[in-house]
Each structure stands twice: as structure tokens, then as C-alpha cells.
Amino acid sequence: MLAAFGVIDWGVLLAYMALVASIGTIVSRRRDDAEGYFLAGRSMPAWAVALSIIATSLSVATFIGVPQEAFTGDLTYLSQSIGTFLAVIVVATVFVPRLYRAGTITIYGYIQQRYGQPASIAMSVMFLLGRLLASGARLFMAAIPVSLLLWGFDARSADLAGIPRWQLVASIVLIGGIGVAYTLAGGVRAVIWTDTAQITIVAGAAAVSIYMLLDRIPVSAGEICSALSAAGPHGASKLRILDTSFSATGKFTLWTALIGATFLNTAAYGTDHDLAQRMLTARSPLRGSLSLIASQIIGTLVVAMFLVLGLLLYVFYQRPDIMGQAAPSDRVVWSYGVYPQFLLNHMPAGLAGLAMAGMFAAAQGSLDSAINAMAGSAVADIYWPLRRRRGLPPDSSTRAPRIAVILMGAALIIFAVGAALVYDARTQTLIAFALGIMSFAYSGMLGVFLAALLTHRGSTRSVMAALFVGMFVTALLQDGIMRIWTLHLTGRPHTLAFYWWLPIGTACSFVVCIAGRSPRAGAVHNAPAPAGTDSR
């Protein structure tokens, strides 16, 4: 364990954990049925929903992955917020009103009303697989700074970019176990209310870290900007936000922002129950839509803070000519650990604990929501329909939801261990790794939802075929496979940036889905709002 993390820091970190536990305990006193466990009686205030969406969407990938993007590159990752805003407008105006008024526990209930129960079960299974992969990757990322906190860093005995695999596995089990515990206690109410506390701590940790770095760097902010303006590759500026070049391999260009990021975020907020569930807990579809838009305004500011952190860390660690005698004695061994390394080695007592509490908050904010959403889908879209088919009476208790929470949490831990074993730090940044994994499920799911919302076509069979095609096309676009078949076709290997996988896969999935005719077309277009809600 690092000596820099002292008793005061541990006290702050434990106080954060006590706060989260107390929120879960208080919320668990409310007696909800199964629907209330997953939707909170559609009674959550819009501001809390907005903060919960931010906490879920940012995750630990933001906490340690976004600073890495600026540390090794520039600010072009921020340009992807253009696509995010375009996506949330589409989701807020097209998706949320229809999905909310469908009156179902999960968004895949809408697919059941359009295409039948087998189609909704297939969508739910695809969501569960995709969320296992994506949230497993996030849980693995969270294990990186936790491993540093618990065991420190010893380059002589480490293998995966500085951390022994057994340490990563132990950290994954620890974080996952905590997430399962308080999600189990209070359902989605506990998730949302703990998220509101967690995102506040995340933003506070970033702000404190920026202040400390500016205090440690012995030049003015203007001089820092001047140094960064020519510090990128080949003399380019690290302050660049827009990359207008057109390159199929470029990750964060203007074109990936307008197209790729728009598709990715439309899929994330409109077809992934992990995020869409929040909007269903609001008091009306309008409030759910407004909470989504508000969350992106605040979330973009938080992302910008973490990018600024990455630039300041670059100056702190990589520019001894600027730091002079204040240059740090420790060396950055691997870029994705640079922010946790700074927190543990250079933050004063108490503030290091606050910052690490922010990291835990980022990890738990995405983990608890994923567990609850997956449990909700498994119960409402798979378990309950199977009970009805067997002629068993309805089960509105929270017994099945709680068992599902435990099972989904265990599955996430297993997938996170798998992500730790397959991730290659030499070829992928953490952000690219997390976002690329999501495309496998999203391609088919977005194609099906667009067909259901925008057309009167599609059938149970075409939905299932579309889900398969979306996943298959995305697999073909992976770097290794694409290198092989482009080498065979053109004589030269080519790759395609992960942001393009989803638009291509979605287009193919959409075409396949509308090939079928739906006898249920338009069935829910005029469905009434659930009882006890309004449309304001």
C-alpha cells in the first residue's frame, strides 16, 4: 500500500462509503412491489434523474480514461459532445414519449407491443449480453486505481502494464460486491439517490485536482496554454478541439462526432435500458426528456474538466523544462494510470482521500445502475413471461428482482475478470476499449428501435434477424478481421475507427428489420400514459 495514502485519507474514503451505505439503508425502508423496485413508482424528481444519468454515463472510464486521452493526445474527444447533443434531442423527442407511454417496466416492453413477446425477449437477451460486456469493461477499469490504492505499484513484479492480474481480480470482486450490496437493498431509488451524491463527489474531486495541479505547476495559466499550443505530435497543438480531417481510422474527428457519436449516443440513451430506465422513473415523459437534456449540458462540463486534468498532468509529468525544481520524482509508466498515480503520490492528506472517493463514486455510479437495469430486464422481459407461459400466477414481490440483482452482479464480476485478461494496453486506450465493446449489441438494437418508432414494418422474425446481422457486421469491422479481408481484397490491410462500426451495423440491421411486415404496426402509437402520470 502506498505510504502517501494516510490515515486521514482512509477516513475520508470510509466516510464516503458510510454515506452510500446510509442512503441505501434509508431508501430500503420503503416497501415497494416489483414495479416500484425497478421504476420507483415513476415519482423521481427531474433534477435527481438528470444527476443519475450523468453518474451512469460517465463511469470510471471518464475518471481515468478521459485524462488519458488528453495526456497522450489533445482535446478532440470533447468534440464528440456535438454528436451527444444531437442524439439526446432525437431521444428526448422521438424515443422517450413513446417508451414512457407504453407503460412497461422496461423499454423492451414497447418492442413486445410492436412485434410480440419473442422479439422483446430477444432484445432483452441482446441488451443483457451487451451490458455484461460494456459494464464488465467499466468494472475492470475501476479495478486499476483500486489496485494501486491497495497494493501500490511495483514494476519488477507486475505484468499487465504495471499491475499483477491477481490484484485486478481481487479489486474487481471488492468493487462488485459493494455495488451489489446497496443495489440489492433499495432498488432503483437507492441507485438514483446514491448517484446524486456520487456525481457531486466526482465533480468535486476533479475540481480539487485541477486546483492542486495549477498550484504545483510553477508558471501561469497563460504560459501553460502557450506551452500546450505546440506540444502535440509533430508540433501540433494539444489544445485542438476540432479535427476536420477525414480519416477512416481517426477516432475523434468532426465526422465521427456528427455521425458516429450521434449513432452511439442515440443507441446508449434510447435502446440501452441501463440509461433509458432513468427517464422512465420521472413523473412524466416531458420531465424525463428534460432531465436527459440537462444531464448532457452538465456532463459535457464534467468531461471538459477531466480533459483539462489530462493536459495539466502532461505538463506536470512530461515537461521538466516547465516544472523545473518542482518536477516530480516518480515516472509515468503507463498513461492510463497517470491520474490515479498523481492522486496517490502528490495530493495532500485528506484531499487524496476525497479524490479517491470520487474514483469510487465514478465506479459505483455506473455499476449499480447496470446491475439494477439488467435485473429489471431479466425479470420483466424473460422471467415473468416464462411464468405466464407455464400458467403460474403473477409474482409482484421483490424476491425475484433481488435474486436477479445478485445473479447479474455475479455475472458482471465474471465478465470484468475476462476484460482484464483480454485488454491490451499497448494497442487501445481505455475509452476506445469501452466504447468499441458497446457497438456489438447496439447495432442491432438501434436498427430495431428505429424500425419500430419510424416505420410500420417489421416482424418477430425480422427483429431476430436484424439483431444477428447487427452483431455480425460489427464483428466483421473489428481491426483484426478487417485487416485480413481488406488485405485479401486490396492487397493492403486497412482498419476502421470504432465510431464507424455502429452506423454501418445499424444501417444493415434497420434494412433487415423493415423487410418483415408487422401485424401490430402502430399498436402503441396512441397508447395512453400509465395510470397516475401526466404529460407535463
Image: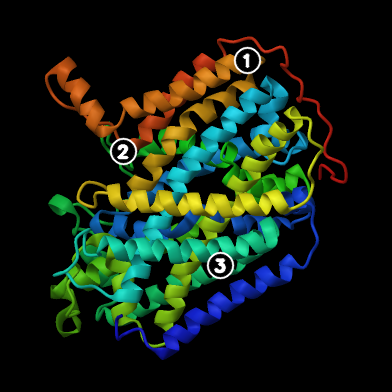
Q: Please state the horizontal and vertical placement of residue 263, each as a whole percent of the image.
A: 48, 34
Please state which of residues 369 and 84 is positioned toward the viewer in this rendering.
Answer: 369
Which residue is identified by label 1? 459
Categorize mark 2 by other alpha carbons within 10 Å: few (<14), some (14-19), many (20+).
few
Q: Secondary structure at mark 2?
A: loop
Which residue is identified by label 2? 244
Q: How many marks on residues? A: 3
The image quadrant of residue 187 is bottom right
Q: Which mark is residue 295?
A: none
Query: Which one is in front in this view, the residue at disc 1 or the one at disc 3?
Result: 1
- Residue 313 vertical position relative to residue 295 in the rendered view, above or below: below
CA gap, disc 1 to disc 3?
42 Å
Q: What residue type is disc 3 on?
A: Gln
Q: Quadrant of the C terminus?
A: top right
Label 1 or label 2, whichever comes before in sequence order: 2
Query: Which one is in front in this view, the residue at disc 1 or the one at disc 2?
Result: 1
Residue at the image point whose x is 14% and y is 74% from the top: 320
Which residue is identified by label 3? 198
Proximity of marks 1 and 3: CB atoms separated by less than 8 Å = no
Q: Is residue 210 visible?
A: yes
Q: Please state the horizontal and vertical placement of residue 99, each as a whole percent of the image.
A: 70, 35
Q: Please state the horizontal and vertical placement of residue 261, each as a whole percent of the image.
A: 44, 39
Q: Secondary structure at mark 3?
A: helix
Q: Please state the horizontal and vertical placement of residue 129, each as a whole percent of the image.
A: 48, 38
Categorize mark 3 by other alpha carbons within 10 Å: few (<14), some (14-19), many (20+).
many
Residue at the image point whose x is 39% and y is 41% from the top: 437
Q: What residue type is disc 2 on?
A: Thr
- Residue 193 vertical position relative to residue 132 in the rendered view, above or below: below
Please state which of residues 121 and 343 is positioned toward the viewer in this rendering.
Answer: 121
Q: What's the coloring here?
A: rainbow
